[in-house]
Image (cartoon, rainbow, N blue to C red):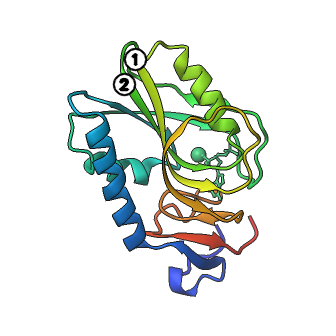
Amino acid sequence: MDTALPAAADPALGEVVVSRDEIAQRVANLGAEITADYEGRAPLLVGVLKGAFVFMADLSRAIDLPVECDFMAVSSYGAATKTSGVVRIVKDLDLDLTDRHVIVVEDIIDSGLTLQYLRRNLLARGPASLEVCALLLREGQQKGGELGLRYVGFSIPPEFVIGYGLDVGERYRNLPEVRVFRGTP
Ligand code: IMP
Ligand code: MG
C-alpha cells in the first residue's frame, strides 16, 4: 500500500456507477421481493466472500423473515482484475444445505464462471431450492451456461468497478458507492 489518500483525492476513483441512495433503494426492493417470494419459509443466505459481505449485511436486514446466514469463500481472481476461470473453495459453509431454501448472495457476475461452479457445487448438497441474488451484473460478459439469476440489483457496463464490498487488491471495499476503477491494479 503506497498511498492513503481520502476518497475525494484518490485519482484511482472514477465515476460513480451506482450511488449510495440507489443501492439503498434497490436493496430495500430486493428485500421486499424476497420477503414476499419466501413467505412462510426461512431462507438460508449464502454470502460469497469477500466481495458480498457489505451487500449481505444490508440485504439480510431488508428481509422480513427468519433468515439464516452462512458464508463461503472462493477464489477466482487472485490479485488481478481478469478471471482465470479457475475457482477454488477457500472456506466452505458451516451449515448443511439439505432441504434448505438457499439464496446465494454475490457481489458481481462477470464471466459467470464463479457462479456456474458454485451452483453445481451447492446443488449437489441437496437443497430444497437454490436461487441467486447478485448486486451487479456486468452486461455482455457472460460465457453462456445456466446462471439462474433470479434477483439482480443493477446491470452495469463492462468496466472494472470497486466499492460496496468490491476491491482491487483488498482496497476500496469500504466505499459506500460503486465506482469505476481508474488506477493500475
Ligand atoms: P466471474 O467468475 O468472472 O463471474 O467473476 C466473479 C467474481 O470476480 C466476483 O465475485 C468478484 O469477486 C470478482 N469481480 C468481477 N468483476 C469485478 C469488478 O469489477 N470489481 C471487483 N471484483 C470483480
Ligand atoms: Mg467475489
Residue at 55%, 14% in the rendered image:
124
The answer to whether residue 6 of the structure is visible from this angle is: no
Query: How many residues crowd around disc 2 within 10 Å: few (fewer than 14), some, or many (20 or more)?
Result: some
Q: Label 1 is placed on what type of residue?
A: Ala
| Residue, disc 1 | 128
Residue at 35%, 65% in the rendered image:
24
Give left or right: position of 77 versus 96.
right
What's the distance in space between the residues labelled 1 and 2, CA to CA? 5 Å
Residue 101: mark in rendering = 2
Of labels 1 and 2, earlier in sequence is 2
Element marked by disc 2: strand
Determine if the C-beta at disc 2 is less than 8 A from ligand 1. no
Element marked by disc 1: loop
Image location of residue 114, percent across then percent down: 65, 37
Is the residue under label 2 in contact with that under label 1 (CB below 8 Å)? yes
Q: Check the image and report above or below for 119 versus 1.
A: above
Give left or right: position of 112 versus 132.
right
